Image (cartoon, rainbow, N blue to C red):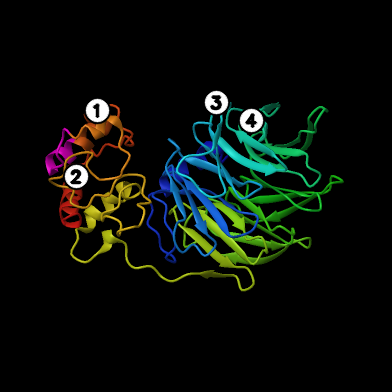
């Protein structure tokens, strides 16, 4: 069975794959979550590069880039009043003001494992986490009601049309948590559920690892929408409930018209896994994000992607070592080869590599280095880079936040060094 841990493992693999579709804003690693503000003027995206980025609706350029989180951002939701909430792999939830900020207004702590999903309504925030619990937070004072009952990870959260919190889990169940009453098991599907969407008529849509979306009506009747056999990881409904979209690590996006359940669009994701979906408030556009770190926009009237074909990635430029470019893909998830243009933020999780050889460690202006790298007591040369990836960053630079990667193939190491000498030369 393709379980949730397999989904996460697949995400880590796919995060390093190159993009092959329209040129749109880019995270430094896989994009895991997005949320659209109620007025449609802004949206936020978060991912494995630990960044929360706020964009205008046209995705023209970032309005705010924050790297406050210390781990992957796995959940986002728009808050009443225009702010956002983000949840990370350490179990922390950050509340961001409507005007944007480098650091959150408040942090909600209580979960002991990764936040899987967030939902918000009327001063309440519902969080689902891999620690087997959900929490219902009162935003006014930060107090929380702990919701326990799932067997295993709680993977999805939503507020039903009547305001009752609902969760789904790896145990295959949908559970409701009415105030002042015992929790209710609404359905038992027998397979892990990965995403939830609440429709205005009271119907709950639940996505599963079997590629099926299940529609549970208020009176208990059940319908199925088939998106294929690949697991699903993301689900979104338009505000009026007329459109429902689902996607997952297999790539591609299915969009149905409701209540008929007729497939309206089968959209291409350029071969990329899709991990996040969100409709514009009027339902005319669908935003998507996934393994290549890119946000995409689809016109729901025509079923077409908006955007232009990108220029070739820097690692594919003529004259560069192709084998080295292949090896560099794992590094390219976090590091750009060139410095950003003046006045533009660097959206990668790590510092750029322009002028790498001969540069002292921890010397890129404005980058928030760990204490170990900020000492600057090492100069990057082919020899020191080779040592870093032969012994591992954790051994060469104890205390670094760099991911632990070891390159034990001498030919790959030689190709990587050739490529870096060519591609990072000032």
The residue carrying mark 4 is 142
Which numbered disc flags the more N-terminal residue, 4 or 1?
4
Q: Nearer the viewer, residue 57 or 134?
A: 57
Mark 4 or mark 1, whichever is nearer to me: 4
Task: Name, please, the residue furthest toward the front.
Answer: 99
Q: Quadrant of residue 134?
A: top right
Residue 231: percent from left, percent from top: 58, 48
- Provide the residue span drawn in magenta: 377-387
The residue carrying mark 3 is 112
Mark 1 or mark 2, whichever is nearer to me: 1
Q: Quadrant of residue 57?
A: bottom right
Using the numbered discs, state the Cα–Cα distance from disc 3 to disc 1 in whole angstroms: 28 Å
Which numbered disc flags the more N-terminal residue, 3 or 1?
3
Q: Nearer the viewer, residue 59 or 224?
A: 59
Which numbered disc flags the more N-terminal residue, 3 or 2?
3
Which numbered disc flags the more N-terminal residue, 2 or 4?
4
């Amino acid at each position: 069975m393709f379980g949730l841990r397999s989904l996460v493992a697949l995400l880590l693999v796919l995060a390093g794959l190159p993009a092959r579709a329209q040129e749109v804003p880019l995270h430094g690693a896989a994009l895991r979550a997005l949320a659209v503000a109620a007025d449609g003027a802004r949206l936020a995206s978060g991912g494995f590069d630990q960044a929360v980025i706020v964009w205008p609706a046209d995705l023209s350029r970032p309005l705010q880039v924050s790297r406050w989180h210390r781990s992957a951002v796995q959940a986002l939701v728009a808050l009443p009043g225009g702010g956002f909430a983000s949840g990370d792999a350490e179990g922390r939830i950050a509340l961001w003001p409507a005007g944007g900020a480098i650091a959150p207004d408040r942090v909600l702590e209580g979960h002991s494992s990764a936040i899987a999903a967030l939902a918000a309504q009327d001063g309440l925030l519902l969080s689902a986490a891999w620690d087997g619990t959900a929490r219902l937070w009162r935003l006014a004072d930060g107090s929380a009601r702990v919701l326990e009952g799932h067997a295993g990870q709680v993977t999805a959260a939503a507020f039903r049309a009547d305001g009752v919190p609902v969760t789904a889990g790896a145990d295959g169940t949908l559970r409701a948590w009415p105030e002042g009453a015992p929790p209710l098991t609404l359905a038992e599907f027998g397979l892990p559920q990965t995403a939830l969407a609440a429709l205005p008529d009271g119907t709950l849509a639940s996505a599963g690892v079997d590629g099926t979306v299940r529609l549970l009506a208020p009176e208990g009747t059940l319908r199925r929408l088939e998106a294929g056999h690949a697991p699903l990881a993301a689900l979104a409904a338009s505000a009026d409930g007329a459109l429902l979209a689902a996607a997952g690590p297999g790539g591609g996006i299915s969009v149905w018209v409701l209540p008929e359940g007729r497939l309206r669009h089968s959209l291409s994701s350029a071969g990329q896994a899709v991990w996040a979906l969100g409709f514009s408030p009027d339902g005319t556009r669908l935003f998507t994000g996934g393994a290549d770190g890119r946000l995409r926009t689809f016109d729901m009237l025509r079923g077409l992607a908006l955007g232009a074909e990108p220029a070739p990635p820097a690692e594919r430029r003529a004259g560069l070592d192709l084998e080295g470019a292949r090896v560099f893909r794992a590094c390219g998830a976090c590091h750009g080869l060139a410095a950003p243009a003046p006045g533009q933020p660097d959206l990668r999780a790590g510092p750029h590599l322009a002028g790498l050889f001969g540069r002292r460690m921890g010397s890129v202006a404005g980058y928030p280095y760990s204490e170990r790298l900020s000492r600057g007591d090492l100069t990057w040369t082919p020899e020191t880079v080779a040592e870093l990836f032969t012994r591992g960053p954790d051994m060469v630079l104890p205390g670094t936040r760099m991911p632990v990667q070891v390159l034990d193939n001498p030919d790959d190491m030689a190709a990587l060094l050739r490529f870096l000498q060519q591609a990072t030369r000032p």
